[in-house]
Amino acid sequence: MKCLDLRNIYLKKMKKILIIEDEKNIVFPLKIFFENEGGYEVLHAGDGFEGIEIAQREKPDLIILDIVLPGIDGYLVCKNLKNNISTGNIPVITISAKTSKDDIKKMFDVGADEYIPKPFSLDKIKKLISKYFGEDQNE
């Protein structure tokens, strides 16, 4: 009985991160990093429509979002998520190769919380995750 109680406490504390990204060479290292380094539950969507659906169903604690996606782009995904009462408060970190001032401004205009240009470092991601999850960066 005690093990079951501890397992339930652990599962309740585990944070969920949704990665909405179609490039496997980006998804795989992020997934491994989040699961192994942070102990997070990682969800993945390969296109914008699937990302919205998973976000609405699973209510992740944080979303990593690319701009260039099949189906609908990251701008529309972010706008949809931020305008939805059930997902509007979820932090969205954009990771994209689109780095013009206009692209970055447009992403912030639709509600993104952070913007990281590709290529990115895992240290930068770790710092942002710590910022949003209130975790000590030295752990």
Image: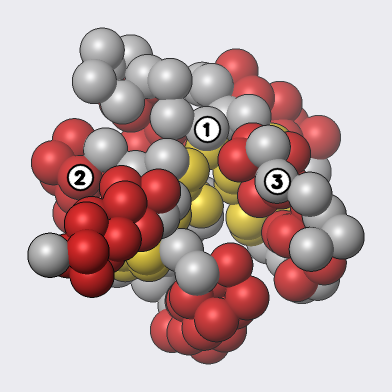
Q: Residues within 10 Å of mark 2 (few under 14, many from 20)?
A: some
Mark 2 touching mark 3, by CB under 8 A? no
Foreground disc of the pair 2, 3: 3
Which residue does the numbered mark 3 point to in the structure image?
135
- Among the 4 quarters of the image, the one containing residue 137: bottom right
The x, y position of residue 72, in whole percent, is 29, 46
Q: Nearer the viewer, residue 113 or 136?
A: 136
Q: SS of the residue at dot 3? A: loop
The quadrant where residue 84 appears: top left
In space, the residues marked 2 and 3 are separated at their CA atoms by 22 Å
Of 24 and 103, nearer the camera is 24
- Measured from the top left, where is residue 50 in percent x and y? 19, 54
x 73%, y 60%: residue: 126
Q: Image check: 91 left or right of 134?
A: left
Write down the residue under mark 1: 91
Q: Is residue 76 visible?
A: no
Type of residue at label 1? Pro
CA separation in Å, label 1 and label 3:
15 Å
Residue 23, relative to residue 139: is it above or below?
Answer: below
10 Å crowding of disc 3: few (<14), some (14-19), many (20+): few
Residue 63: percent from left, percent from top: 46, 46
Residue type beneath disc 3: Glu
The residue carrying mark 2 is: 58
Distance from disc 1 to disc 2, alpha carbons, whole Å, reads 14 Å
> In front: 102, or 119?
119
Give the mark nearest the N terminus, 2 or 3.
2
The amino acid at mark 2 is Glu
Circle nearer the N terminus (1, 2):
2
Q: What is the x, y in percent for residue 62?
A: 47, 43
SS for dot 2: helix
